[in-house]
Structure formats: C-alpha cells, structure tokens
Amino acid sequence: MRILGIDYGAKRWGLSYGDELGVAVPLAAAVGAAVEARFAEVESVIQARRVTELVVGYPYNMDGSAGFKAKEVDAFIAELERRFGLPVQRTDERLTSHAAEAETRAAAPKRSRRDGRSVGARQAARATGEVDSRAARLILQDFLDARQGPPLLPEEGE
C-alpha cells in the first residue's frame, strides 16, 4: 500500500504520502503555473514512490452535503483516474485547511516587532504550497486512521 494524498486547489495541489506504516507525511506541493505542469509533478511522485492508490480531499459542507466545489473536484478525480489508472478514494476535508494554517503558524518563527524580518512567512508558505501539503497530510492521515480501524484495547485484567 503506497498512497498519495491530494488537497486539490485551483492554483496548487497539496501532496502527501503514506504507506503500510500508517503515517502520512507532507511532500512538496504541485505548484506549476499550468494544470499540465501540476499533473506532471503528480505523475513524477506516483512513479518515484510507486503509488498504488490516490486519496483526494472532498469538499463536504458542515451538514455532510457536497460543497460547492464538489463538481470541480469530481472532474479532477475523473482526470486522475483517466491519466493514471489508479483507484481514487474521496475523504472528508472539512476544516483541514484551517488546521494546516494553524499548524503553519505554530511552526513559524515568531516575528520581531522591531525589524519585522519574519513578515511574509505565512504568505511564503502559502505560495510554495506548504499549507496545502500540510492539509493533504491531514486528509491522508484521517483516511489511514479510518482504514486501520479503532486501536485494540487490552483485555480486562491485563
């Protein structure tokens, strides 16, 4: 099992990777200016990591209905299936981008009020796709956790 997690966006696609160990790790995002360049980046990762399955974050609303971007993501998924011939799973992506933003803020060095040198660190993380790949990691980790099932509890009295 080698899985590529994808957080789809209009300009960037966050990427993550997971295997039988059950731990998702962020990868460099597909940030090519053209869609074809992004697909080429995804293809490169699929080949290099010998990916066997794709997991794409799906835009559900808080009430569980499909979000407004669902048709766009459905078209993206259809194109992934056509190009790569791999099974594609959809998984709930609600709040992953917000969690990834918070993770990025927490990991960023505190900026100095005096010289302001760290100003723009969040914008740089967004432009490079770091936040998108963190969201892809969260998406894939949720999928891996659900696939593994609940942890086994020790027998009573052990």
Image (cartoon, rainbow, N blue to C red):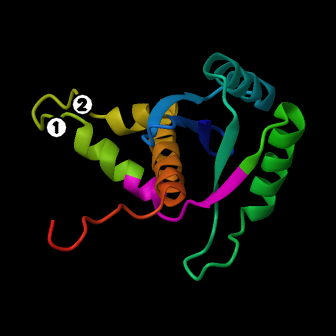
Q: How far apart are the two marked residues, 1 and 2, measured between alpha carbons?
A: 7 Å
Q: Quadrant of residue 70?
A: bottom right
Residue situated furthest right in the rendering: 82
Q: Residue at x 82, y 32 (%)?
A: 84
The reply to whether residue 120 is in sight is: no
Range of magenta residues: 89-99
- Residue sitting nearer the eye, 147 or 100: 147
- The residue singled out by tag 1 in the image is 110
- Place of residue 90 in the rendered image (x, y in percent of width and height, measured from the top left): 68, 57
**What residue do we see at 44% from left, 37% from top?**
21
Q: Quadrant of residue 6?
A: top right
Residue pointed to by mark 2? 118
Amino acid type, residue under disc 1 in the picture: Lys
Q: Is residue 95 magenta?
A: yes
Q: Is residue 7 left or right of residue 18?
A: right
Q: Residue at x 33, y 33 (%)?
A: 121
Per the image, label 1 sits on a secondary structure element best described as loop
Task: Please provide percent x and percent y for residue 110.
Answer: 16, 37
**Do the CB atoms of the residues marked 1 and 2 lie less than 8 Å apart?**
yes
Name the quarter where the C terminus is drawn: bottom left
Mark 2: amino acid = Ser
